[in-house]
Image (cartoon, rainbow, N blue to C red):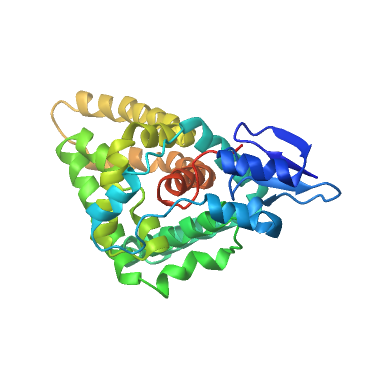
Amino acid sequence: MYKIIGADQKEYGPVSADQINAWILEGRANGQTLAQAVGSTEWRALSLFPEFATVLAAKRPAPPPLGSADPETTADAVLERGVQVNVGECLGRAWSLLTSNFGLFLGASLLLALIQLGLEFFVPILGGFAYFVMFGALYGGYCMIILKRVRGEHSGVGDLFTGFSQDFVQFMLAGVVISVLTTIGKICCVIPGIYLAVAWKFSLVLVADRHLEFWPAMESSRRVITRYWFQLFGILVVAYLPLVLFMGYSLFHMFTVLFPVVINGGGRFDFSEMIRLTKGFLPLWIIQQLIEFLTLPFATAAVVYAYEDLFGTRPAKAA
């Protein structure tokens, strides 16, 4: 007998193995559904129970062509599956995954933040450039830590650095090109920049998971997410809501401080005064980095669940 966690994050059971097999065949459960054998205290993905392996293998749909260099082929294979992305389900599953892997995810986020701050503070100019180059590999490794846990596989903080031992050039190019083009898009017109930032959200995961080259990964991500753009945008807005609200407050605060200085200057620009006031914004920047550090695991997990629903080899919905 077993208990399981449904897509609504509620506990069901005890139920028999035959009942769970029936749910798998109906598409109400899958390999990522969490289950607990009666008498045990451990919750595990159904894919880790050998007694469900046969039914899971029979139910599993054909995955998109692995490692295809043609982004159109990869994207079309995903879109033909007709999978739906449910914002609430992605967020709910991400929260459950985060609470059961809190130490690992927060530890990986902390290490990522320390690398960034260490390079930018202790290696002026060159450190910032180094992190800019390494970001793709680091974030790709971070995504794989979470993706492995989504699939019920083992992962550790050391996986953060897997991008340095394989596909580093592709990670680097993807990270750099995405950063540069989205920044240009935001400068020229805000809307294209926001569209691209969301549309390329699967790029580094595709490099890490499917070992695509950077441009096919970016194009595959863009083509697929364009159909589900508003769902992914909704996931990101909700997951990063504390950060979005604080950034809005920070911009308003900076405007109220700097605008009177410009207006009251009588047309003269007092550079030294502006520098003095800008230094006062350092606490805001530190708080913003802290909020980003705390929201990153949840947001990334939600995006990874959406990725797995679309590009993975399992149905989107659990029981």
Image coordinates for residue 59, horizontal then vertical, percent:
53, 49
Looking at the image, the residue that sits furthest to the bottom is: 165
Q: Residue at x 55, y 42 (%)?
A: 94
Q: Residue at x 27, y 46 (%)?
A: 222
Q: Is residue 178 visible?
A: no
Is 101 located above or below residue 285 in the figure? below
Q: Is residue 189 visible?
A: yes
Quadrant in the picture for the N terminus: top right
Image coordinates for residue 90, horizontal then vertical, percent:
50, 38
Q: Residue at x 59, y 37 (%)?
A: 28
Image coordinates for residue 231, horizontal then vertical, percent:
38, 33
Looking at the image, the residue that sits furthest to the right is: 39
Nearest the viewer among 63 and 91 is 63
- On the rendered structure, is 172 left or right of 15? left
Is 313 located above or below residue 10 in the figure? below
- On the rendered structure, is 233 left or right of 270? right
Image coordinates for residue 53, horizontal then vertical, percent:
63, 57
Count every numbered label the image shows and give the total: 0
Quadrant in the picture for the C terminus: top right
**The image quarter in which residue 26 lies:** top right
Nearest the viewer among 225 and 276 is 225
Q: Residue at x 49, y 41 (%)?
A: 316
Nearest the viewer among 67 and 155 is 67
Is 59 located above or below residue 121 in the figure? above
Is 6 located above or below residue 130 in the figure? above
